[in-house]
Image: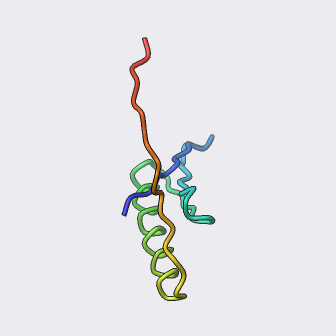
Amino acid sequence: MRYTVVLEQEEDGGYVASVPALPGCVSQGDNRNEALNNIREAIALYIQDCRDAGDPIPTEAGKEFVEIVAA
């Protein structure tokens, strides 16, 4: 499965990562790699919780991304 992760740098240099398709799925880290590793773990736990509860697993179907080059 693939999910969009929003990574924001904090004023203190740490990072906060969130997953818009998974409400409340948020993590953080002291650096970019740590935040991304932590959010991967949080996503896995979120999905496992959905499975355990018998709830549907949210998806991001229908999203498209466009890359442009700005001059």
Q: Residue furthest front?
A: 62
In the rendered image, residue 32, in percent from the top left (x then y), is placed at 44, 48
Its colouring scheme is rainbow
- Please state, as top left, top right, bottom left or bottom right, where the C terminus lies in the image: top left
Q: Residue furthest left?
A: 1
Which residue is at 55% across, 59% downward? 21
Relative to 53, is 62 on the left or the right?
left
Which residue is at 57% across, 61% downward? 26
Q: Residue furthest top?
A: 71
Image mark count = 0
In the rendered image, residue 15, in percent from the top left (x then y), is placed at 53, 49
Q: Of 3 and 64, which appears nearest the observer?
A: 64
Q: Of 71 and 40, which appears nearest the observer?
A: 71
Q: Of 70 and 41, which appears nearest the observer?
A: 70
In the rendered image, residue 25, in percent from the top left (x then y), is placed at 57, 65
Which residue is at 53% across, 54% downward? 17
**Quadrant assignment, res 8:** top right
Relative to 65, is 8 on the left or the right?
right
Which residue is at 42% across, 55% downward? 36
In the depicted structure, whether residue 6 falls above or below residue 45:
above
In the rendered image, residue 51, in percent from the top left (x then y), is placed at 47, 84
In the depicted structure, whether residue 51 falls above or below residue 3:
below
- Please state, as top left, top right, bottom left or bottom right, where the N terminus lies in the image: bottom left
In the depicted structure, whether residue 4 falls above or below residue 65:
below
